[in-house]
Amino acid sequence: MLARWLSAGLGAGLLASAASAQETSFARVVHCKNEAGYAEIYLPGSVVFGRGAEKVKLGGRTVGGYIAFDFTPVGKNKTLEAVRISASEKEGALIVAFPERDSRSATIPQRGGAVRFPQRLAEEMTCGPLNTD
């Protein structure tokens, strides 16, 4: 009886987590480029409420997002990497932390500008303004 109850509870929990994972959408909020390629930052749709920097509501928390780097001439080879993203109100920027890269991070100005990513070929990129397209 106890085993059946545990099994049912575990199964329901797994189904609920699988369903919620499928419902998560992401929005591209930053596009960067240099001579070698492109980088794009994606945030969960739950913190993006339209276009414009003011429509990105992180509320002082760090959220999971993705970065896509593409260094192919035709722009068809994006690889996604999980990142942790927070806002720096003082600097007016997004902080993108790369947990897989020994806590290295990149700072992206909300108005756009030069950014140094901890990625070969992306050390010097120019990013557009936050959440404009």
Image: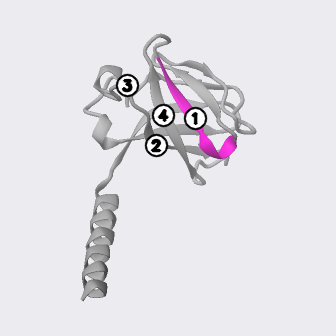
Q: Which residue is labeled 1 in the image?
A: 97
Observer-nearest of 84 and 117 = 84
Q: Which residue is labeled 2 in the image?
A: 65
36 lies above or below 88 = below
User: Start and end of the magenta stretch?
Assistant: 93-101
Earlier in the chain: of badge 2 and badge 3, it is 3
Q: Secondary structure at mark 4?
A: strand
Question: Which residue appears at 60% of the width and 31% of the height?
Answer: 33
Q: Secondary structure at mark 2?
A: strand
In whole angstroms, how far apart are the C-alphas of marks 2 and 1? 10 Å
Q: Position of residue 65 (x, y in %)?
A: 46, 43
Earlier in the chain: of badge 1 and badge 3, it is 3
Q: Amino acid at mark 1?
A: Ala
Depth-wise, is mark 3 or mark 4 nearer the camera? 3
In whole angstroms, how far apart are the C-alphas of marks 1 and 3? 15 Å
Observer-nearest of 9 and 52 = 9
Q: Position of residue 121 (x, y in %)?
A: 74, 37
Q: Which residue is labeled 4 in the image?
A: 85
Q: Position of residue 13 (x, y in %)?
A: 29, 68
Observer-nearest of 33 and 10 = 10
Residue 99 belongs to the span the image colors magenta: yes
